[in-house]
Amino acid sequence: MAERPETTEAVERTPDTANMSNTPDAPPPTSTRPPLWRRLVRRDAGFGVLVLLALLVTVLVISRLPSASTPSPTTPRQTNNTATPATQSAQSGAIVQRANAQIIPMPTSRAGLMQPAVDAQGNIWVGEMVTNQLARIDPKTGQVTEWVPPGGKYNIMATAIDRQGDVWFTEQAANYIGRFDPATETFKTYPLDTAIAPRMAPQDLAFDANGQLWFTLLGGRIGRLDPATGAIQSWQIPVPSGATRSYPFSLAVTSSGVWFGYLNGGAVGRLDPATGKVTQMPLANHQAAVYAMAADASGRIWFTEMQPAILGSIDPATGKVTELTVPHSAGDPSILYGLVTTGDGSVWFASAGANAVVHYQASDDLFTFYTLPATQSIPFGMALGHNGAIWISGDGAADNFVARLTV
């Protein structure tokens, strides 16, 4: 697989340090909110434009995806786990408290921050959808350095850091996997047009224990890239029951397989790369969109459903799915975005509706809402930093920011 090295010039900018805050501001409102999509568009005029722009880009990308009948070199076998998922809601307890956070605003107020990652030096890396840049944020100084990816089309979605410190990302509209070397400030791109097919639209990505890079494709496939050789392989993912297209979106890779969530059709699944077998597990809501996914230390898979706000998990040994309704203790928690797990068994996820980062402790069946300092912060992406530090990206109505939660 051919790699395309390209150099780029960095732009360094430091936001107003007066806005770097560790102190909470005014508390967010807890009044009843209007329906989800109306709420997102009506947060304010500027954010409404951003949401509409993002939706337009997504619609355009998806509308150009190959049809489900596109021939594929690998045909998976499919089995369905039809056990009814258990939905538990009334038993779950909840606490609401104000979050303490180190907030670092971005130089561009509406940069359109996506899914972040944290490197070994503690720097945060994140794509800026609106500015078409890859950004590095130094949490010690607040300095933001930005690079424009080659052939970028304003669609850096997710980022991940490899063992060498290189930054990998998906460029959805440009249809490639990108690699950035911070030491040389050079990019390499791995085009999917020839490796798999045009208009595959890569979304999420994650490394396995052997350093192989896995990624989801809204074109109905899951791919794997070998960083040492650049070789790319892919597996077709079947359409979930009740849907007309296959949109694998979120991703978690463990020793038990490659787990994924569909953006449509209300299902999660597991791919066995050795056999190509795909097992689907239906959710209670057949319209559910699974946004984020991560494995905990025991190998259990956790995921967020955007609306209604559901925290789900999968027992990898049995395939049993458990769904927990997120309490409305801090207001309507829809919609749920990023999710991470920590070594102590905790699950953390972002709730845009509640304007909060939420902690769930399975041993106590307890949700704790850490409401963010500024209203309408729109917590989005999440990443795990040093010593279990929780970082989020925020696409707020007034400002975009990254923040470290200090609870």
Image: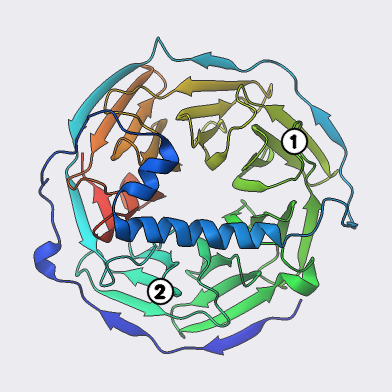
Q: Amino acid at mark 1?
A: Pro
Real-space CA distance between mark 1 and mark 2, rounded to the nearest whole angstrom: 35 Å
Q: Position of residue 131 (x, y in %)?
A: 40, 74
Q: Is residue 341 above or below residue 71?
A: above
Q: Position of residue 393 (x, y in %)?
A: 35, 55
Q: Going 74% across and 51% down the picture, which residue do you hit?
A: 220
Name the quadrant of the C terminus.
top left
Q: Are marks 1 and 2 in contact (CB under 8 Å)?
A: no
Residue nearest the observer in this picture, 186 or 73: 73
Residue nearest the observer in this picture, 344 or 72: 72
Q: Going 75% across and 36% down the picture, which residue do you hit?
A: 240
Tell me the element at label 1: loop
Residue nearest the observer in this picture, 44 or 400: 44
Is residue 34 left or right of 310 when viewed as pictured? Answer: left
Q: Position of residue 126 (x, y in %)?
A: 41, 64
Which residue is identified by label 1?
240
Name the quadrant of the N terminus.
bottom right
Q: Is residue 342 above or below residue 108?
A: above
Q: Going 53% across and 43% down the picture, which residue do you hit?
A: 291
Which residue is identified by label 2?
131
Picture quadrant of residue 325? top left
Q: Residues within 10 Å of mark 2 (few under 14, many from 20)?
A: some
Tell me the element at label 2: loop
